[in-house]
């Protein structure tokens, strides 16, 4: 009995010299983009020195734009390299060396994309500089006035210290309070059902209410109601309490996800060894969960730090309050921009630290297979 064999599929066409022309279009587009980028960056740099307000910002912005122009010119380096690789590819295909031709074609295309990728941040910087100089450099004067920034720096820095104090105190309380709420949501058994419901209601409510409303209700509502102890809180501690209530709900969910991410066999093994539920959570589950949820916890704390600017509504003299005073007195928002810069300075390093933690955890997971 003979079995019919399926006809073999025709071999795919091997790449030839015509395929090298695909890189030609990419290189051509990269060349046009590099020329356009260099022209725009050069124009922005010239305008910076020609029409910008004389002073430190002119030299700072001008120096930055000269660096941007240098990067724009550097984009031609990979472009030239790509053109050379394309020539190598064409010669290789002509000689019948397909492997060398394909490798050179890939390098040529990669060099073109590298040149185009370099142009994008340069264009962004150039258009930002043009935006600052628009309308007779009104944007630069309104948002980046060096004299107003320097004049308000002392008071804004003192107010910013209040923001840092509120953030640190609230983070400490949130770490403990959020863990307690998470454990309450995971209390087992029928007897723990009311506790679970209460914790769930708390999390749902405070995740639904905007932070500014909680701050307003705590800062003004408790003193108005003459609640014992709470009515005598200073604006700083009222802000700490409000932010702790709000972010405790978010952090509780982060803790809960980490606790539920610990494999059930860990709990089963601990209980089989005679540990109670409380000791199992304390010595086995929670330590593992905390290590897993460190990156999302830090992300929540970054958000908490930014929300400290909302405490201005209850009279806390923070950085934003000081900046608003200067803005209303001089009709200039440079002091507010200074506050934004201070928040950026303390937030970006933490963000990069979170990225490193996430990358480290990802490497561990890949190593475990």
Image (tube, rainbow, N blue to C red):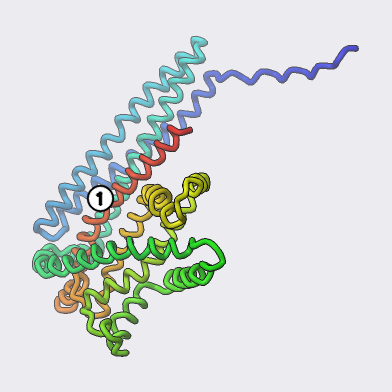
Residue at 37% across / 21% down in the picture? 84
Residue 284 % position (x, y): 41, 48
Using the rendered image of the protein, determine whether residue 165 is visible from the camera's viewpoint. yes
Residue 134 % position (x, y): 25, 62
> Looking at the image, how many numbered discs can be counted on the residues?
1
Q: Which residue is the extreme one toward the front?
A: 274
Q: Which residue is the extreme one toward the right?
A: 1
Using a 10 Å C-alpha cutoff, classify the residue at mark 1 as few (fewer than 14 neighbours), some (14 to 19) or many (20 or more).
Answer: few
Q: Is 221 placed above or below 305 here?
A: below
Q: In which quarter of the image is residue 255?
A: bottom left
Is residue 156 rendered to the left or right of residue 110?
left
Q: Which residue is the extreme one toward the top?
A: 95
As rendered, which of 138 and 253 lies closer to the eye? 253
Q: Is 113 placed above or below 262 here?
A: above
Residue 211 % position (x, y): 36, 72
Which residue is denoted by mark 1 in the rendering?
349
């Amino acid at each position: 009995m003979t079995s019919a064999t399926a006809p073999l599929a025709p071999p795919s066409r091997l790449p030839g010299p015509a395929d090298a022309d695909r890189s030609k279009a990419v290189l051509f587009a990269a060349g046009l983009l590099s020329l356009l980028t260099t022209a725009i960056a050069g124009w922005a740099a010239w305008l910076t020195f020609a029409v910008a307000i004389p002073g430190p910002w002119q030299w700072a912005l001008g120096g930055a734009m000269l660096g941007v122009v240098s990067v724009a010119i550097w984009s031609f380096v990979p472009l030239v390299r790509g053109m050379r690789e394309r020539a190598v590819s064409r010669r290789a295909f002509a000689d019948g060396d397909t492997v060398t031709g394909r490798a050179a074609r890939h390098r040529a295309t990669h060099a073109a994309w590298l040149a185009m990728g370099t142009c994008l941040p340069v264009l962004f910087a150039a258009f930002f500089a043009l935006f600052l100089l628009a309308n007779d450099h009104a944007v630069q004067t309104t948002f980046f006035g060096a004299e107003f920034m320097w004049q308000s720096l002392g008071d804004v820095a003192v107010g910013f210290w209040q923001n840092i104090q509120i953030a640190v105190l609230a983070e400490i309380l949130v770490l403990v309070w959020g863990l307690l709420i998470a454990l309450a949501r995971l209390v087992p058994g029928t007897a723990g059902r009311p506790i679970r419901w209460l914790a769930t209601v708390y999390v749902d409510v405070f995740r639904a209410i905007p932070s500014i409303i909680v701050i307003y209700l705590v800062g003004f509502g408790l003193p108005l109601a003459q609640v014992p102890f709470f009515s005598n809180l200073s604006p700083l501690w009222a802000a700490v309490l409000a932010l702790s209530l709000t972010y405790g709900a978010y952090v509780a969910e982060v803790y809960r996800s980490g606790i539920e991410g610990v494999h059930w066999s860990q709990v089963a093994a601990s209980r089989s060894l005679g540990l109670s539920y409380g000791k199992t959570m304390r010595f086995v589950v929670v330590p593992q969960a905390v290590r897993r949820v460190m990156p999302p916890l830090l992300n929540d704390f970054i958000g908490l730090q930014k929300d400290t600017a909302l405490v201005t509504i209850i009279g806390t003299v923070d950085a934003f309050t000081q900046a608003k005073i200067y803005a209303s007195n001089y009709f200039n928002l440079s002091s507010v921009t200074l506050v934004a810069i201070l928040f950026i300075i303390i937030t970006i390093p933490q963000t990069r630290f979170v990225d490193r933690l996430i990358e480290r955890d990802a490497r561990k997971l890949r190593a475990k297979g």
